[in-house]
């Protein structure tokens, strides 16, 4: 369970994609996918994971596959990077 203030393991490239799409604002993206600007901010900052439907809508706005927008950081990869893998 995610605790308040914790980060999700879902990483994203929304900010970069917005920049490369005529510097789209968070509000413009939110309007196009039916989310508030505050929700887009929370998703970009990794404080909130969007629904599957919202994730697909975001990818569609940028014309890229879902995997180009969102990546899931699995626990074993995080453990290896920190040097504490459990088997």
Image (cartoon, rainbow, N blue to C red):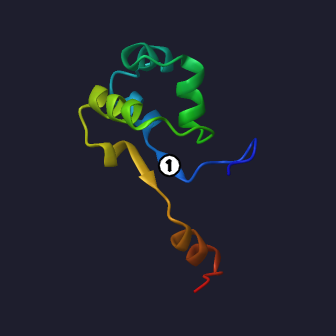
Q: Nearer the viewer, residue 39 or 26?
A: 39
**Does 84 appear above or below 44?**
below
User: At numbered mark 1, what does the secondary structure look like: helix, strand or loop?
Assistant: strand
Which percent across, then down, holds residue 63?
A: 23, 32
Name the foreground residue: 18 vs 82.
82
Residue 59, image x and y in percent? 32, 34
Residue under circle 1? 11
Name the residue located 48 percent from the left edge and 19 percent from the top edge.
Answer: 35
Q: Residue 51 lies in what quarter of the image?
A: top left
Q: Determine the residue positioned at 29% across, 30% down.
A: 62
Q: Is residue 10 left or right of residue 53?
A: right
Residue 9 versus residue 39 in the image, above or below: below
Above or below — where is 24 with respect to 59?
above
Given the current orientation, which residue lies at the most extreme right position?
Answer: 4
Circle 1 packing at 10 Å, graded few (<14), some (14-19), many (20+), is: some
Q: Determine the image quadrant of residue 87.
A: bottom right
- Measured as percent of width and height from the top left, residue 43 is found at 54, 35
The number of callouts visible is: 1
Which residue reaches farthest bottom?
87
**Residue at left 40%, top 22%?**
23
User: Based on the displayed image, in which of its 4 quarters is residue 17 positioned?
Assistant: top left
In the image, what residue occupies the spot 60% across and 32% down?
42
């Amino acid at each position: 369970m995610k605790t308040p203030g914790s980060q999700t393991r879902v990483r994203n490239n929304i900010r970069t994609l917005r920049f490369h799409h005529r510097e789209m604002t968070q509000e413009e993206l939110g309007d196009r996918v039916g989310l508030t600007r505050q929700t887009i901010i929370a998703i970009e900052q990794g404080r909130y994971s969007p629904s599957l439907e919202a994730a697909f809508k975001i990818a569609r706005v940028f014309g890229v596959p879902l995997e180009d927008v969102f990546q899931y950081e699995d626990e074993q990869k995080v453990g290896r990077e920190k040097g504490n893998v459990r088997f």
